[in-house]
Image (spheres, rainbow, N blue to C red):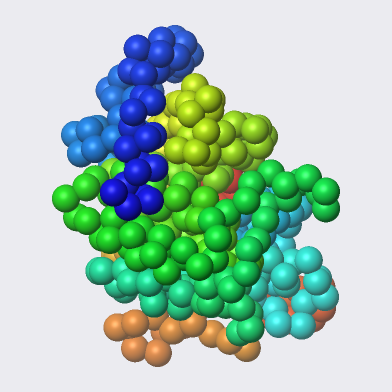
Amino acid sequence: MTWLRFTIKLALNYLDNELMKEYLGKIKEQIPAKLKKIEDVHAILSDDLLSTKLPQIPKTLFYILQFISSRYLSGGNSLTESRRVSIKRLFLNKAINDFDDKEGKSLVISFTNYVTALKYLKTKSYITKENINTAHAILIGNTKIGGKLRNKQNYVAKNQKEYQFIPPIHTSLPYLINDLVKFINNKEISPLVRAYHAYTQFSLIHPYLDGNGRMARLLWDRLITDTKFLLNPSLYRLVNGSLAKYKGALEISLKPEKKQLAKEYWGEIFAWSTKNISTIKIEYFKFYINAFATSPLLMLRLNSELIQLIIENPIINEAEPIFLKGVGSTRLHETNMYKKRTSANGAVIYECKIAIQFLIKIEQLLFN
């Protein structure tokens, strides 16, 4: 039995449905209207998820949620650092090259790398070891170690004297990665189960010298689908703030005593994600209506590509226009969706107020 199959089997052996149902009973008392089929959450670590009823969302909203989430998932410490950079500040830095904001520029780079790497992986119907290495190289933007499996032992350390976790020896990495690749490409297994194991097992394998956490989050986002949708579990760390529960959720396959901690944590993630997606869907349709009211002629030609273009570019630099496909030479900022103004450093920019308000609202729903 391979290492991955052994750890999966070990994790499944420690599931206790009765304990999970008792815990979920407490959650259902808090938000009963939002959590239909909540009993099925105990299947978070099993193939029973093939029949689990998770929230369905429009495909465009699925893309938007992943895009918004990317700014929090994209850096080694961005789970905390990105909160200091507002949505508007982020996109000002993205639109204006000479904007004097080192922190904002740094986040733009890591954010752009994450989105680019995710788009790359989404072009692959079958994910190979080489695809993962290429995505990792894009993700960390470092040619020296990007996309290269480590050739020495690494450690996850609390400080210079105390190790929190020691990953597998580097000589075992090709075997472990190949085994993981076989599992995540098994289409007979639920996307959510594959996403879960890619997320947890990749973190435990820790195959690179840097960027392992980011790559694990990226694999989750690539494998999850709009038909079995769950928000990226790393986002919940911003809400819950419990590093101990997060680590316990990852270590269930190595430390059986962590099983209850892990089950509680994944139960909370399921509840938090389900509740928020219901609310976010309402805000998405509000944005759609506001966009139509703002520019009805443009929105009559509305499609998912156009919405994504607006969300990706709520602020546009006049010097770097974005042209609409199939609409002649029309530039996106020339529509009624955008208003012209001058930035603090004198750059002429165009701002889509309703897109920025929508992004801020989604952020508030997720984290407040």
Is 170 left, or right, of 210 in this rendering?
Answer: left
Where residue 322 sits: x, y (%)?
A: 49, 82
Q: Is residue 302 above or below residue 256?
A: below
Horizontal side of residue 116 vs 351, given as left or right: left
* Residue 145 visible in this rendered orientation of the protein: yes
Kindly indicate the quadrant of the structure image that contains residue 100: bottom right
* Residue 120 drawn at (x, y percent): 40, 74
Quarter of the figure with the C terminus: top right
Q: Residue at x 59, y 38 (%)?
A: 247
Q: Which of these two is toward me, 334 or 68?
A: 68
Q: Is residue 112 above or below residue 288?
A: below
Q: On the rendered structure, is 237 left or right of 202?
A: right
Question: Is any part of residue 229 visible from this angle?
Answer: no
Horizontal side of residue 134 vs 84, given as left or right: left
Q: Residue at x 22, y 33 (%)?
A: 48
- The residue closer to the viewer here, 83 or 349, is 83
Residue 250 lies, in percent from the top left, at 52, 41
Nearer to us in this view, 367 or 208: 208
Q: Toward which corner of the image does residue 235 lie, by quadrant?
A: top right
**Residue 291 horizontal/vertical position (percent):** 43, 57
For image coordinates 22% across by 47% down, the residue present is: 189
> Which residue is located at x 41 percent, y 60 percent?
176
In the displayed structure, 244 sits above or below 357; it is above
Total residue callouts: 0
